[in-house]
Structures are given as C-alpha cells and as structure tokens.
Image: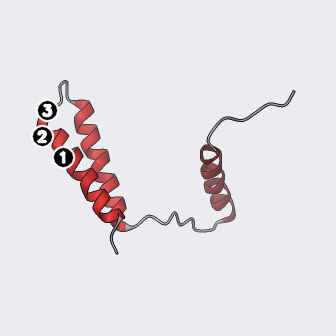
C-alpha cells in the first residue's frame, strides 16, 4: 500500500526554496510588483482593523471591495 500526499505542493516547495536560498546566500526574487506589495499591505491592515473590532461596519466592507477592485484592475494592466 502506498501513501498518497494530498497536500498542496506549494506548502512544501516555497519554504524549501526559502531555506535553500538562505543556506546558499542567494537572493530570492518572488516576482511581486511594487503595486501588488502595496495592495497586499493595505489588505492586511484593513483585515486587521476588521477583525480587531467587535462589529464590522459598511465602510470597512466597502474598503475591502475597493481593494479587490483595484487588484483586479492592476491584474489586467497592459
């Protein structure tokens, strides 16, 4: 009987690539644009605000939707 691995290969691959790059002293480039990093940070801050409050409100929901819309627009930029 053979064991099957149903996990996502990325959960094992990315930490391994990071470990190898640190061990060999090479620079790891993930290919993330500056605009994507800004959107990621804004999304993380907005999510922290949303989940730290006892109740969410309409404004924070709109901010999440606007960030998602900006991401979609930047995804298809020429």
Kindly identify which residue carries mark 3.
57
Q: Position of residue 64 (x, y in %)?
A: 23, 45
Which residue is rendered at x = 28% and y = 40% of the image? 47
Badge 1 crowding class, 10 Å Cα cut-off, few under 14, some 14 to 19, many 20 or more, is some
Circles 2, 1 touching at the beta carbon (< 8 Å)? yes
Q: Position of residue 18 (x, y in %)?
A: 61, 55
Badge 2 crowding class, 10 Å Cα cut-off, few under 14, some 14 to 19, many 20 or more, is few
Which residue is rendered at x = 19% and y = 39% of the image? 61
Q: Position of residue 70 (x, y in %)?
A: 25, 58
Real-space Cα separation, disc 2 to disc 1, in angstroms: 6 Å
Relative side of 4 to 15, left or right: right
Query: Residue 69, located in which quarter of the rendered image?
Result: bottom left
Q: Position of residue 72 (x, y in %)?
A: 31, 58
Residue 5 is tagged as none
What kind of element bears circle 1?
Answer: helix
Kindly identify which residue carries mark 2.
59
The answer to which of marks 3 and 1 sits earlier in the sequence is 3
Query: Residue 21, located in which quarter of the rendered image?
Result: bottom right
Circles 3, 2 touching at the beta carbon (< 8 Å)? yes
Which residue is rendered at x = 32% and y = 53% of the image? 41
Kindly identify which residue carries mark 1.
63
What kind of element bears circle 3?
Answer: loop
Query: Residue 71, located in which quarter of the rendered image?
Result: bottom left
What kind of element bears circle 2?
Answer: helix
Q: Quadrant of the N terminus?
A: top right
Real-space Cα separation, disc 3 to disc 2, in angstroms: 6 Å
Which residue is rendered at x = 18% and y = 30% of the image? 56
Q: Quadrant of the C terminus?
A: bottom left
């Amino acid at each position: 009987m053979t064991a099957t691995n149903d996990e996502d290969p990325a959960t094992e691959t990315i930490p391994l690539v990071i470990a190898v790059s640190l061990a060999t002293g090479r620079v790891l480039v993930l290919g993330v644009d500056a605009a994507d990093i800004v959107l990621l940070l804004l999304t993380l801050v907005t999510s922290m605000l949303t989940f730290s409050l006892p109740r969410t409100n309409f404004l924070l929901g709109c901010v999440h939707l606007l960030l998602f819309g900006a991401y979609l627009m930047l995804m298809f930029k020429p």
